[in-house]
Amino acid sequence: MTVESTAARTPRRSAGNKAGTTGTKRTTSTTKKAAGAGKSAEPALVQLLTPEGKRVKNAEFDQYVADITAEDLRGLYRDMVLTRRFDAEATALQRQGELGLWASLLGQEAAQIGSGRALRDDDYVFPTYREHGVAWCRGVDPTNLLGMFRGVNNGGWDPNGNNFHLYTIVIGSQTLHATGYAMGITKDGADSAVIAYFGDGASSQGDVAEAFTFSAVYNAPVVFFCQNNQWAISEPTEKQSRVPLYQRAQGYGFPGVRVDGNDVLANLAVTKWALERARAGEGPTLVEAFTYRMGAHTTSDDPTRYRTDDERLAWEAKDPILRLRRHLEASGHADEGFFAELETESEALGKRVREAVRAMPDPDHFAIFENVYADGHALVDEERAQFAAYQASFADEDGGK
Amino acid sequence: MAEKMALAKAINESLRRALDADPKVVVMGEDVGKLGGVFRVTDGLQKDFGESRVIDTPLAESGIVGTAIGLALRGYRPVVEIQFDGFVFPAYDQIVTQLAKMHARALGKVKMPVVVRIPYGGGIGAVEHHSESPEALFAHVAGLKIVSPSNASDAYWMMQQAIQSDDPVIFFEPKRRYWDKGEVDTEAIPGPLHKAKVVREGTDLTLAAYGPMVKLCQEVADAAAEEGRNLEVLDLRSVSPIDFDAVQASVEKTRRLVVVHEAPVFFGSGAEIAARITERCFYHLEAPVLRVGGYHAPYPPARLEESYLPDLDRVLDAVDRSLAY
């Protein structure tokens, strides 16, 4: 597989889609805080790389990527390509019956890698179930993410191992955990920060509103990173809000900014800015990464029922990986050797993931009763013993034959 | 050192001791700071331990429990107050979906030492949503532990133990007993948190209860004694886990069991006790296990609550029915 083909991995087109919704966001106001490259009635959008890969100046945010090197840029590109390759492999593994479900991040690589690479090791991440790119940045082995989708566990990695919390499936809940964790950082007198990921759908959850309130009241060092990928399964963002999501922050008394979610450099810069605010004791920030879920919500979803090919094609033209590749090529920051080597590495990752998943054993039956409580529970002990006796009764039958 | 104090004061003293002993313990909730809580259970704690340890929160229960989970992940031991029983449901999702399951989801890699304090139960003439007994709705959820003290000494020590627990504990405080005084020995070594206690020995029938109904059952036993009946009263103290061994031991002696709680009988903790004791003690029982509790109706307006709540006569009626078998 070539890098190009990796970058172009998108759902198949389907004919006859009658959905009339477009990705256009109609808004009536903009805020000064989000001054950037936006124009006309669209809210301002921080963009440092155009879809064509051209670097554009930004007075406010250039400083956060001023020291970025060609090697750093190649690193971001590598992160995005490998994440997409891993994601494609997981989708394939679901189709092969090796995974029960997969939630693809296709199209959201820049938002995740840009924000993920802005973090320090001592920062803490609270993801949704789609943050495979952020997990990659944190050093969580990709194969660890697949356990819950294969059905061998409900999480499975040590959150404190990489300061990357477990995936949260009930949307929005983790924004409160992030806020509480950030309150703890303040109590400890540390200068770490927390980032909470969520989506446009979750922005409607009460927990997110409460997280905004708590973080504002306690001035908690947390960055709320909303990937507005335009679709909450079948519901467009218009079904969640009548104002651009980043503007919600204003009502809570902290800044919100919309960033081009498909521009890895802009996501890196804006997240660094927000994290610096958190570390400096300036409290929470809402970042709305304006991006697009190029794939289905999950492997169980059929997006052809609710959105048009035109919309997807328009977003494919803004592909996050393609845009950085154009920039790398135009600026001479990467040569053919780099891309070829990455292609080899990418295929090796796919192979490793494939083999690891196929070799992943089912857990022991008794895992049902493990870790229900930290200090034990009489009923769990009793039921485990009953289960053991029941299982043993089959062994007796077998033995008697 | 033993001292006589009200149940609410015993919890206050216990929280004070925990805050003093462990800098990771934080108390949070609505009005718990300057006001000292609507029942004054946290009275004076913010003054002595500061606003970062005794935290007045925004009025958002899901937010209170959700941020407590985050604090626990950071290494804190939050003790959160839900102001009234009927206010817990906005936090129910965080408790059931997140708090209860986090340890298992992380394959044991993280612990959730969070105590959720809930003043519960009726009998104080309160308005709607201030008199409920939702313990069964939590006992049904694996990952949670549920306790309810009946007296000042237990309130003090069970709170100490709940805070020390690495599992989430829902701590149901019998609000109508907040002002009942009892001896509290702050140097005594307490028994295990989830073990029941025989508070009155008897031979003819076992009354099992927890929280606010233990005192009632003791009064019932007194009344029954006047009629020549010798009832045993078992204070369960814990609703998850339930000390079935203690119930079984008592029933094997008395052969009759009546379970009393304020919560509705239907799918209540009494139903679970009846089922399990029937399994364990089938050949010892002289009568079916009977239950006395609330009805399958919304908690009534205050002027009707005396008819809704178990009282001396309703429990005695159940005792008579059991003994009639």
Image (cartoon, grey):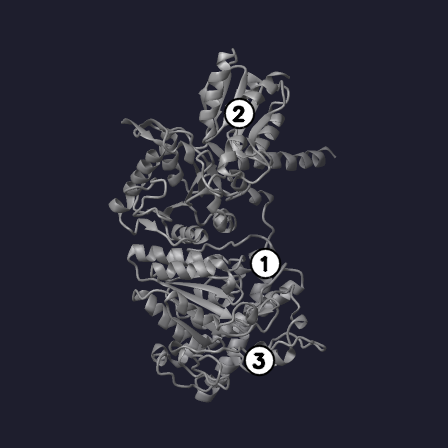
Chain of the residue under the numbered disc 1 shown in the image: A
Question: Which image quarter is the N terminus of chain A in?
Answer: bottom right
| Between marks 2 and 1 in the image, the one whose residue lies nearer the viewer | 2
Q: Are marks 3 and 2 in contact (CB under 8 Å)?
A: no
Specify whether disc 3 shares its chain with disc 1.
yes
How packed mark 3 is, by other alpha carbons closer than 10 Å (few <14, some 14-19, many 20 or more), is some
What is the secondary structure assignment of the residue under circle 3? helix
Identify the element where label 2 is drawn.
helix
Residue A47 image offset from top left, x and y in percent: 44, 81
Residue at the right extreme, as displayed:
A401
Instruction: State which chain disc 2 sits on.
Output: B
The amino acid sitting under disc 2 is Val
* Badges 2 and 1, same chain: no
The alpha-carbon separation of the residues under discs 2 and 1 comes to 43 Å
The residue depicted at 30 percent of the width and 40 percent of the height is B16
Above or below — where is B199 with respect to A132?
above
Q: Which residue is mark 2?
A: B247
Q: CA distance from mark 3 to mark 1?
A: 27 Å
Image coordinates for residue A380, horizontal then vertical, percent: 54, 37
| Residue picked out by circle 3 | A316
Q: What's the residue type where badge 3 is placed?
A: Glu
Around disc 1, counting alpha carbons within 10 Å, would you say few (fewer than 14), some (14 to 19), or many (20 or more)?
Answer: many
- How much space separates mark 3 and mark 2, taking CA atoms? 67 Å
Q: Which mark is residue A149?
A: 1
